[in-house]
């Protein structure tokens, strides 16, 4: 196989008579690589889809400029050449004509010297969708692998739930070795090995992504789960979607009926 330069390190050794030894710390990634991502969505599930917003962040926090192609056949292509080797955090949101988020994803990406990192991802529209991942064309190092606990394919809407991560039994790492970021539909919502959604999530299809890394360069890894949130009532029965507090913002959609009760409370009901 062809050899690929991955890392660099150096040290100074003063030779003396007798046995000599030296330790070299290889901690600098070297070289350049390229990135190609194809983002797709289902036209029937997202008839109002208009554009895609993407963001790429290096492991040191530097944001990298990306320019998706114009949407064509319900997909966009992202190509970036001459990228520094290392780990990157990639997020993407599918937007409608008004800029509202319809769906979103987050992935960890690795770039290796002289190699192309490429993949195809479909924005989730059901608990079983959102398939695909970004792969690198060689296997020079292993990213952090974790599992997401606490999530089912069908969850009750607007009900609190807690998620946490777990390392495989074969991993030499501990949870304390990791820096973890949580995403909901491509939007960062928390950090740490555990996260609680106090108000749950609204009805619909959602995707949870988690990106983990250690302090070592090139260690960033990711995992994701798509799920559906639904009301725990019989079809056609009213249910309480959420509670509004003084000063909180809210938005009414079509099919909403409002009526004042005898105690001056406002009852709002809708068919959505």
Image (spheres, helix red, strand yellow):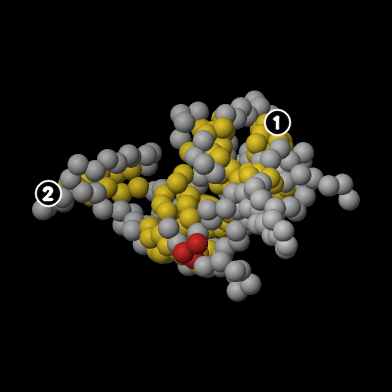
Q: Could you tell me if the residues under marks 2 and 1 are in contact, i.e. CB atoms within 8 Å?
A: no
Q: Nearer the viewer, residue 6 or 258?
A: 6
**Residue topped by disc 2:** 264
Q: Position of residue 194 (x, y in %)?
A: 42, 62
Q: Position of residue 195 (x, y in %)?
A: 41, 59
Above/below status of 210 relative to 101: below
On the picture, is 9 further left or further right than 116?
A: left
Nearer to us: label 2 or label 1: 1
Quadrant in the picture for residue 239: bottom left
- Give the residue displayed 35% in from the left and 47% down from the top: 270
On the picture, is 163 further left or further right than 122?
A: left
Above/below status of 81 relative to 196: above
SS of the residue at dot 1? strand
Q: Disc number at residue 81?
A: 1
- Give the residue displayed 54% in from the left and 56% down from the top: 214
Quadrant in the picture for residue 230: bottom left
Above/below status of 109 relative to 233: above
Q: Position of residue 64 (x, y in %)?
A: 56, 32
């Amino acid at each position: 196989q062809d050899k690929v330069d991955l890392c660099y390190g150096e040290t100074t050794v003063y030779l003396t008579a007798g046995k000599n030894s030296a330790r070299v710390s290889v901690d600098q990634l070297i070289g350049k690589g390229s990135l190609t991502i194809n983002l797709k969505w289902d036209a029937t599930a997202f008839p109002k889809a208009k554009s895609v917003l993407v963001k790429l962040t290096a492991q040191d926090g530097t944001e990298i400029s990306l320019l998706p192609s114009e949407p064509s056949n319900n997909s966009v292509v992202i190509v970036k050449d001459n990228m520094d080797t290392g780990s990157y955090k990639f997020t993407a949101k599918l937007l409608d004509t008004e800029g509202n988020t319809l769906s979103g994803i987050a992935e960890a990406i690795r770039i290796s010297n002289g190699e192309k990192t490429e993949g195809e991802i479909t924005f989730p529209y059901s608990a079983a969708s959102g398939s695909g991942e970004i792969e690198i064309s060689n296997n020079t190092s292993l990213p952090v692998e974790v599992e997401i606990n606490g999530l089912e394919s069908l969850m009750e809407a607007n009900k609190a739930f807690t998620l946490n991560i777990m390392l495989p039994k074969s991993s030499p790492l501990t949870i304390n070795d990791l820096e973890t970021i949580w995403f909901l539909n491509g939007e960062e919502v928390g950090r740490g090995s555990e996260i609680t959604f106090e108000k749950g999530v609204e009805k619909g299809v959602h995707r949870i992504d988690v990106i983990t890394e250690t302090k070592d360069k090139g260690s960033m890894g990711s995992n994701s789960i798509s799920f559906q949130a639904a009301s725990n009532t019989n079809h056609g029965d009213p249910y309480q979607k959420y509670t509004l507090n003084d000063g909180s913002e809210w938005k009414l959609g079509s099919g909403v009926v409002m009526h004042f009760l005898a105690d001056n409370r406002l009852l709002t009901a809708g068919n959505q």
